[in-house]
Amino acid sequence: MSVRRNYEPKEKFVERMRELLSGNEDVERYFEVAKSVPLKSIRVNTLKIGVDELKSKLLGKGWEVRQPFSEYPEIIIVDGIEPGEIGKAREHLLGYYYVQEITSMMPVIALGLRKDERFLDLCASPGSKTTQAAMLMENTGSIIANDVSLGRISILSANLQRCGVMNSVVTRHPGSELVLKLSKLGMGFDKILVDAPCSGEGNIRCSPRTYLEWSEKLLKSMGRKQKKIVSEVVGLLAENGEMVYSTCTHAPEENEEVVQYLIDEFGLEIVPVKLPLKVRPGLLYWRGKKFSKEMKNAVRIYHHDNDMEGFFLCKLKKS
Ligand SMILES: C[S@@+](CC[C@H](N)C(=O)[O-])C[C@H]1O[C@@H](n2cnc3c(N)ncnc32)[C@H](O)[C@@H]1O
């Protein structure tokens, strides 16, 4: 495990991780892995190339590749290459693969997208999950890939084009505006993903500067923003439609509290998910707040459990 330059976490962050994790050894391991260099992973874009064909091309370049999950052969870990090489390779430019952290693939796996479904990706840029969804849907059905940031929308469009995605429309609206427009058209969705903007605690290995920007005030204001974003699109779920809410952070203010809000205000129900990683259950309690029993079916992912980035996700259903 190679180690690199790091910033020190604030005392309050350490305190919170002590509350979230289970004992000294767990906490020590968390902060030890936080200083290590993350694995490099890619997702084969089967819209353009077969897994075996790409694998032999990469082996031919001298890359060391391994497929950690037999159920998901398209997920590949790459070892033994120079920094930057993975993004500059010809195969990447041709859209044969998408460079994507493995935990970031979990929300779309949890959604279980199928052919011919109607899918809304509300916070879609730069498009890692939209391209993954299009692949699972085999370019059928329809995807609305939305984001509010103009700069990021252009990267999203470029990624969709590079990956040969043909079933998507890119839109740029805050949720409330999008809902108004789509409801006028009578559109509902079978699946919605809200991969919300967040404080990024789970990304500490890729972005150690997160420690510098971190504060409890930030977590609280992100929580308010996320509740607003996610609540705006609930009305677009079709009957029996399903939604995944995800963040790359550990803060319960941005995770369980947002999910609890969806349960209390909109009557959504949590659906259990099966993922190929070591995961921990959602919290039932945090600093004086009690959550529904079903919150145990939300998913917490810590980087030291899988040598991958930290994440939170919860699948919900409109019944
Ligand atoms: C975590 S990133 C999404 C990453 C993306 N899902 C992917 O996998 O490539 C969060 C995104 O939410 C967008 N965003 C922030 N506020 C939003 C809002 N009100 N409506 C839609 N998107 C928003 C940000 O511009 C950012 O691109």
Image (cartoon, grey):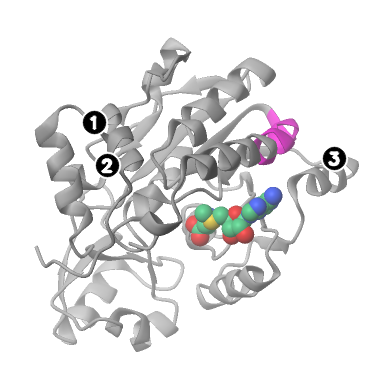
Name the residue: 57% across, 70% down: 160
Residue 217 visible at all: yes
Query: Residue 283, image x and y in percent?
Result: 37, 22
> Can you say whether 281 is above or below 86 in the image?
above
The residue under label 1 is which amino acid type? Leu
Q: Magenta residues, as a range?
A: 229-238
Query: Residue 231, image x and y in percent?
Result: 69, 33
Neighbour tally class for label 1: few under 14, some 14-19, many 20 plus, Cα within 10 Å: some
User: What is the number of the mark on residue 183?
Assistant: 3
**Which quadrant of the rendered structure holds the C terminus?**
top right
Depth check, front residue: 75 or 151: 151
Residue 141 visible at all: no
Q: Are marks 2 and 1 in contact (CB under 8 Å)?
A: yes
The prevailing secondary structure element of the residues shown in magenta is helix
Q: Are marks 3 and 2 in contact (CB under 8 Å)?
A: no
Distance from the alpha carbon under mark 2 to that under mark 1:
9 Å
The residue under label 3 is which amino acid type? Ser
Q: Confirm if mark 3 falls within 8 A of ligand 1.
A: no
Is 123 displayed left or right of 1 in the figure? right
> Can you say whether 150 is above or below 315 in the image?
below
> Which quadrant of the render holds ligand 1?
bottom right
The residue indicated by pointer 2 is 302
Q: Earlier in the sequence, mark 2 or mark 1?
A: 1
User: What is the number of the mark on residue 21?
Assistant: 1
User: What is the number of the mark on residue 171?
Assistant: none
Q: Is residue 307 magenta?
A: no
> Can you say whether 50 is above or below 172 in the image?
below
SS of the residue under disc 3 = helix
The residue under label 2 is which amino acid type? Tyr
